[in-house]
Image: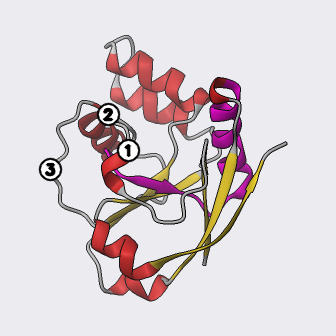
Amino acid sequence: MILYHGSSATIETPDISFSRNNTDFGKRFYTTPIFGQAKSWSLRFKRITGYGVVSEYIFDDSALSEISLLQFDEYSDEWLDFIAVCRSGQDSSGYDLVIGGVANDKVFNTLTLYFRDLIEKQEAIKQLRFEKMNVQYCFKNQSVIDKYLKYTGSGELK
């Protein structure tokens, strides 16, 4: 399976120690099978730093049966609870890989209302069900990255 990572630099050797805190699924290395999503992430970096790069990887998906995996196939109570824990910096789940929806701009607006107690959880989930889920693969274990994710190239956005 091909996965992409949007950034301000080519990432030949992903290292989870460089990631940001309080993100959707915690401080780790994020990829997506959707090139357009990686390009969108990269364009955000380009506006800030002047550089936008999409790196490409081959993921050996035989790993899915060998590692500790948490997968969300839709926006749900469980997804929302997990996002809330991770964004607060309190994730101690121990998963090697988390696959699920991106809290993009549209989704983030709903999450903000929920996190500020302006809407109930069920209302947030109801609103999220109208959004198309853009999938992200969050690698939370460096040894899984080293073993199953292989860099194949990158391209700078012009």
Q: Mark 3: which amino acid?
A: Ser
Query: Can you identify the residue that label 3 sits on?
Result: 92
First in sequence: mark 1 vs mark 3: 1
Residue range of the region highlighted in magenta in the rendering: 25-47
Q: Position of residue 126 (x, y in %)?
A: 50, 34
Look at 66% across and 42% down and name the residue there.
Answer: 42
* Position of residue 111 in the picture relative to residue 2 (left or right): left
Q: Position of residue 39 (x, y in %)?
A: 72, 47
The secondary element bearing badge 2 is classed as: loop
Q: CA distance from mark 2 to mark 1?
A: 10 Å
Q: Residue 22, which numbered label?
A: 2
Q: Mark 2: which amino acid?
A: Asn
Query: Can you identify the residue that label 1 sits on?
Result: 19
Q: CA distance from mark 3 to mark 2?
A: 13 Å
* Position of residue 69 in the picture relative to residue 112 (left or right): left
Residue 118 in the image: above or below residue 40:
above
